[in-house]
Each structure stands twice: as structure tokens, then as C-alpha cells.
Amino acid sequence: MKVLIVGSGGREHAIAHKIYQSPRLDKLYCAPGNAGIAEIAECVDIPVDDFDALVGFALEKKIDLTVIGPDDPLVSGIVDAFEAKGLRVFGPRKNAAIIEGSKAFSKNLMKKYNIPTAKYEVFEHPSQAIAYLKNCSYPLVLKADGLALGKGVLICNSHQEALEGVKAIMEDKQFGSAGDKLVIEQFLTGPEVSVLCFCDGTTIKPMVSAQDHKRAKDGDQGLNTGGMGTISPSPYYTKDIDEYCRRHIYKPVIAAMKKEGREFKGVLFVGLILTQDGPKVLEFNARFGDPETQVVLPRLKNDILDVFEACIDGSLDRIELEFEDNAAVCVILASFGYPEKYVKGLPIEGLERFKDKTDYFAFHAGTKRTGDSIVTNGGRVLGITAKGKDLKEARQKAYEATAWVDFANKYMRTDIGKVVELLP
Ligand code: GLY
């Protein structure tokens, strides 16, 4: 099979790595890719939002399957553009990707189908939101309706902060048209868990759980980032919680989307919070998570091309998902200063240590090749990942491997997965 991946981050490198293991693969392409992906795929310099060029490339190269990584092209209808030309593509159509593209849509869906989530209201005018805030208790959460590079969620500890948030989102349009509508939501507490689920429109199959670490600094301090590290499984996601989520969240949401005429095919990312009152949905995303994918896919035993095709063909019920009975930890090596200002173009040393290892991975995110060197090219540079027999061992191995790589402004959190040391 000839396969094209669309995207350029650590998530896409982890997907590429998994596809590369398939005996069914003849040739792998990635648009635009990065320096790590380029070692196993032919990278083509087409941006993820140039649908005409991507479709043209897939037709010219007779691509059998295209896999879409990022949210923006999915929400803008890249799957519809490929399907219109008769191309096979893994991901939800535009009318299903709205589950990530509009928070108001996903909250209203959950309310309509009794899927547990935080209480909320949706506003289209700042004056209504401001009036509503007068009688709220704090903290509470403001969410810009649309995609905002993961930055459109504000936790407000006071009435004043909330007023400033409404102004930033709805009046100053800090996140552009994503702020045309606003969701004001109850603040919930508890451990957060990410569960990525394969979906074929009717059947939904959750993968092993994961847990992200979104803040830039140790102790969950500092600014929100795209994710500074992940662990899989989450120690909080017990068998009972899994059964509850299958019954009250996963099955109802796939059925709800079908009933609404928005069949969801692809990966549905369920962002959960485990509260005292049971698991609740914080968000749905229409794609693999980043960096969740870097700890989930290395544990998957199936040929991922079989799974992708079953999702497209509506035959996922015939696939038994199998995962290794172990754990994985990913520590992001970032450029110092991320998620604000940072320097790019610095040489990265030591990547050769990962060659031929089966339980250590250096998933590239912001990297590029310049001559003979690989240099930094983004805020999140590498996702250093290790598998171990349990989370403790995986964590110890991942941190050991972070020392194999160096670049001048290397920065990482030192407490990814530290929760395992606190557990009995
Ligand atoms: N790790 C969070 C996300 O992929 O949205």
C-alpha cells in the first residue's frame, strides 16, 4: 500500500512509526513532515491547509490511504475534499469534526444525549455573558467556541478575571472568529485522562488510557502548552471507570453523532475529568492527541493499517484491538521559552542513540534537517518516549534517555508521571 500522512508533529511521527511496521506498507509519504519522519517516509513540502495540492499529490502518486493528523484541516473539510475525488482517507468529515470545531456544538450534543459533562451556558453576545457572570460562583471556565491552538480555555478565579476573559475572547477577538461564541462552564476538579477511540461511524473502540501534562513548568505551574509529556496508562483509569465510560460516554456519543446525521469515522479523543461525582467529559477532539499518541501507539499490537481501513469501511466490530500489557512515558524536550519566545535552528546531538532500540523512541516534532545536521525548528522539539514493564520503569527509562540528546536551549519538565511515586 502507498500511504500519505498529513501533518508535521510528534503525533504524526508516532503514526508514521506505527504504519512503517506494517508488512502491508510499500511506500510512505508525509506532507510536510519533519526531520524524524523523513528517515522513514518521503516528505513532500505541501502545507496541511493546501487541500488542492494534497489531493493532486494523492491522485498523482496513486495513494491508497491518507491519514490526517491535525485538527485544523479536519475541521475545514480535508476529508470531504479527498472523498470528492474518490480517495480513501482516515478521519472524520467536516460535519463530524465539528465535535472539536465548536465547543457549543459538543456541549449541546452532550446535554441532548445525557452524556456527563460540566454545567454550561452558550453566549453569542458579550453583554449577555457579562450579565450572566454577575450571579456565578468562582472559579469558572470560559471557552472560546472554535479552534484556538489550544489556548482558548481560560480558568477565571474571580468576577473581574471573567469580565476580562469575556472582553479578550468576544470583544478583542484574541482568538479571532473562534470567539464569536463563548461557553461558560462550571469548574470541575479531579485527575484528567485522555482516551483515544477508533470509530467507524457505528462502532467505537477505546485504546489504552493516557494522561497529558499541559502546563509548562513542574508542579503543573506556568502557561498552558500543547503538552509537555504523557503517560500511559493513567493510574486513575480503573476497570470500573472504563466500564462506566463505555456505557455512559463512548457508546452514547458515537450513536448520537450517527443519529444527528454526522457519522464519526476516525479517532475520537475523549478528554475526561474523574470527579467525585464520576467521570465527565471536558472535551472531544476529532483526531489523535499530541503527545498522547506517542505513548499509546507504541503499545498497540495490531497492524494499524488494518484498523484504519476497518474504520473507513465500517467493519471495526470485526477488529480485536490488542495492546501490550506494559506502560509508556513521553517527556517533551522543548526550546527554552516555549510556549512564548524561543530560539530555533540549534543543532541537536545524540539522536543516533535511539537507532535500533525497540523500547526507546525519539519522536520528532519541531525539527528539520539542514545539510548534515538536524536542528530545532519549533517550541516542542522531541518527544523522548520509553516503554517499561510498568509506569515506574517506563518513567525511569524515559528520563534516562532525555540525557542522550542535547541542544543548546533544551528544556523539559522533570515531573512527568511523578504521580506514580505518590501512589500506593
Ligand atoms: N494533548 C492534548 C491534545 O492533543 O489536544
Image (spheres, rainbow, N blue to C red):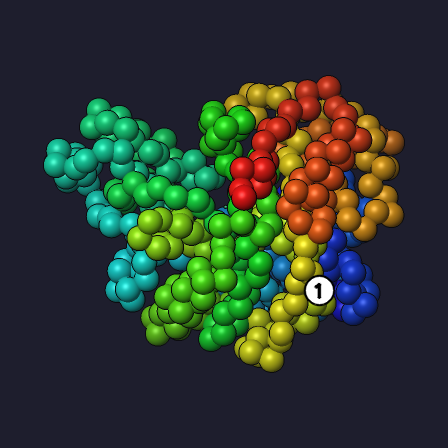
In the rendering, at what x and y percent does residue 230 appear? 59, 43
Quarter that holds the N terminus: bottom right
Q: In which quarter of the image is residue 110?
A: bottom left
- Quarter occupied by residue 128: top left
Q: Which amino acid does label 1 sit on?
A: Lys
Q: Which residue is drawn at 62% across and 69% down?
A: 321
Q: Nearer the viewer, residue 56 or 346?
A: 346
Q: Identify the residue shown where x is 62% and y is 76%.
A: 319
- Disc 1: CA contacts within 10 A as few (<14), some (14-19) or many (>=20): few
Q: Can residue 32 be seen here?
A: no
SS for tag 1? loop
- Farthest-out residue, front: 424
**In the visual, does 9 lie left or right of 374?**
left
User: Where 315 sits versus 380, above or below?
Assistant: below
Q: Is residue 393 above or below residue 162?
A: below
Q: Name the residue under label 1.
A: 301
Q: Is residue 178 left or right of residue 333?
A: left
92 sits to left or right of 302:
left
